[in-house]
């Protein structure tokens, strides 16, 4: 597809590499990539989607993260590259999700990368651990817990991994004092 053409000029099944224009929103991305294995696997779970700079990001509700991870693994995404978080503090409203947990996945057989995200509230942030699906999530989830204070329910050993056990707070939160608590 030429760089200046629009996504509608290619067939929906042309695949991600054929689309150079950014697409935003669940409906627009789903319509452009009807045959994409991740979109097919998560069709009923996707809350938002983005195709930008040739990267696919799918968002799901935090309570469905286990189901989404299992579906993606079954669809061929066999490798968990990373788990990280973003603090969107301050949020527009107190009820808006403050933290975004981002899972970077890779399918060796499909030769595709995928970013899966879920947003959780700032007050007592919690999401289910995916260590039962990808054991390599163990240390990544511990790091996110340590630095952001996000609790991963069902994690086999959710303890600090970088900061001392007696450290007060979570230093990558945007409301954490620059010089720490005194």
Image (cartoon, rainbow, N blue to C red):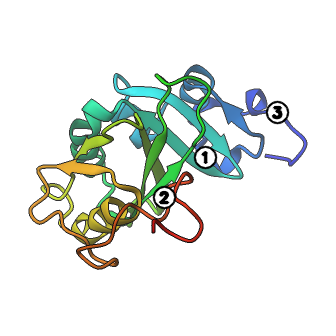
What SS does tag 3 mark? loop
Q: Residue 16 — which label?
A: 1
Residue at point 30%, 39% (across, down)? 124
Give whichever of discs 2 and 3 has the lower sequence position: 3
- Mark 2 touching mark 3, by CB under 8 A? no
What SS does tag 1 mark? helix
Residue 170 appears in which quarter of the rendering? bottom left
Residue at point 78%, 46% (across, down)? 1
Per the model, the C-alpha gap separating discs 2 and 1 is 9 Å
Q: Residues within 10 Å of mark 1 (few under 14, many from 20)?
A: some
- Mark 1 touching mark 3, by CB under 8 A? no
Q: Is residue 19 left or right of residue 156?
A: right
Per the model, the C-alpha gap separating discs 2 and 3 is 22 Å
Residue at point 29%, 62% (across, down)? 141
What SS does tag 2 mark? strand
The percent position of residue 37, horizontal first and vertical second, equals 40, 41
Q: Nearer the viewer, residue 23 or 98?
A: 98
Q: Residue 6 — which label?
A: 3
- Mark 2 touching mark 1, by CB under 8 A? yes
Q: Residues within 10 Å of mark 3 (few under 14, many from 20)?
A: few
Q: Nearer the viewer, residue 27 or 101?
A: 101
């Amino acid at each position: 597809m030429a760089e200046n053409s629009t996504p509608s000029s290619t067939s929906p099944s042309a695949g991600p590499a054929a689309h150079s224009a950014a697409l935003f929103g669940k409906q627009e991305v789903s319509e452009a990539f009807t045959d994409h294995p991740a979109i097919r696997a998560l069709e009923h779970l996707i809350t938002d989607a983005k195709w930008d700079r040739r990267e696919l990001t799918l968002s799901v509700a935090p309570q469905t993260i286990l189901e989404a991870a299992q579906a993606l693994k079954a669809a061929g995404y066999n490798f968990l590259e990373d788990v990280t978080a973003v603090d969107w503090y301050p949020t527009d409203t107190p009820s808006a999700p403050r933290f975004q947990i981002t899972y970077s996945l890779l399918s060796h057989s499909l030769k595709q990368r995928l970013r899966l995200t879920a947003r959780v509230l700032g007050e007592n942030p919690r999401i289910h651990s995916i260590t039962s699906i990808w054991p390599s999530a163990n240390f990544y989830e511990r790091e996110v817990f340590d630095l952001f204070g996000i609790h991963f329910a069902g994690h086999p050993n959710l303890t600090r991994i970088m900061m001392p056990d007696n450290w007060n707070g979570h230093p990558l939160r945007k409301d954490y004092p620059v010089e720490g608590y005194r």
